[in-house]
Amino acid sequence: MRIVILGAGPAGVAAAEHLRKLESETDQSPDITMVSAEPFPPYSPPAMADHFLRGHEHSLFWKGKDICDRLNVRYLAGTKAQAVDAKACRVVLQDHSILDYDRLLIASGSR
């Protein structure tokens, strides 16, 4: 199963973690791709104030900068989704490349 997660904030990371935990119950190991317009590893936007005021990086990257590697998630940093074609089950990226999916999670925040 191919799963695409649009967004790498707390909701997207929590979803990827949960999917990996379900593997042991389902005997399936989905291919997970996480897409983020941000050029950074997944971080917590609410922790940005603490990071900029006190320089605390551990709260900003609350799951560690290597969370996607540890979860075996293909992480596309600095990549914007341009369109979702729900009928064809595909995401068109800004560079016009295509991500096909079986399941799509949109966790892109309030924008």
Image (cartoon, rainbow, N blue to C red):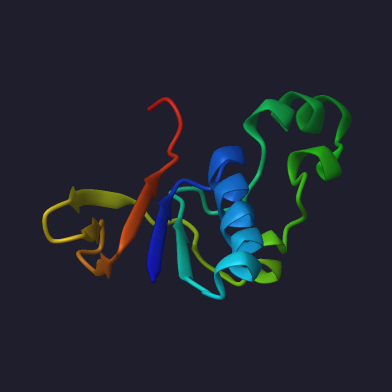
Quarter of the N terminus within the rendering: bottom left
Q: Residue at x 49, y 59 (%)?
A: 77
Q: Quadrant of residue 97?
A: bottom left
Q: Is residue 23 left or right of residue 98?
A: right
Quarter of the C terminus within the rendering: top left
Where residue 72 sits in the image (x, y, percent)?
A: 61, 72
45 or 29, nearer to the observer? 29
Any part of residue 41 in sight:
no
24 or 18, nearer to the observer? 24
Residue 100, relative to residue 10: is it above or below?
Answer: below
Q: Is residue 82 left or right of residue 33?
A: left
Q: Residue at x 38, y 69 (%)?
A: 2
Q: Is residue 11 left or right of residue 108?
A: right
Where residue 66 sits in the image (x, y, percent)?
A: 72, 64
Where residue 5 sits in the image (x, y, percent)?
A: 43, 53
Where residue 102 sits in the image (x, y, percent)?
A: 30, 64
6 or 102, nearer to the observer? 102
Q: Determine the residue located farthest toward the left in the rendered image.
A: 87
Q: Quadrant of residue 56?
A: top right
Q: Residue at x 62, y 46 (%)?
A: 14
Q: Quadrant of residue 64?
A: bottom right
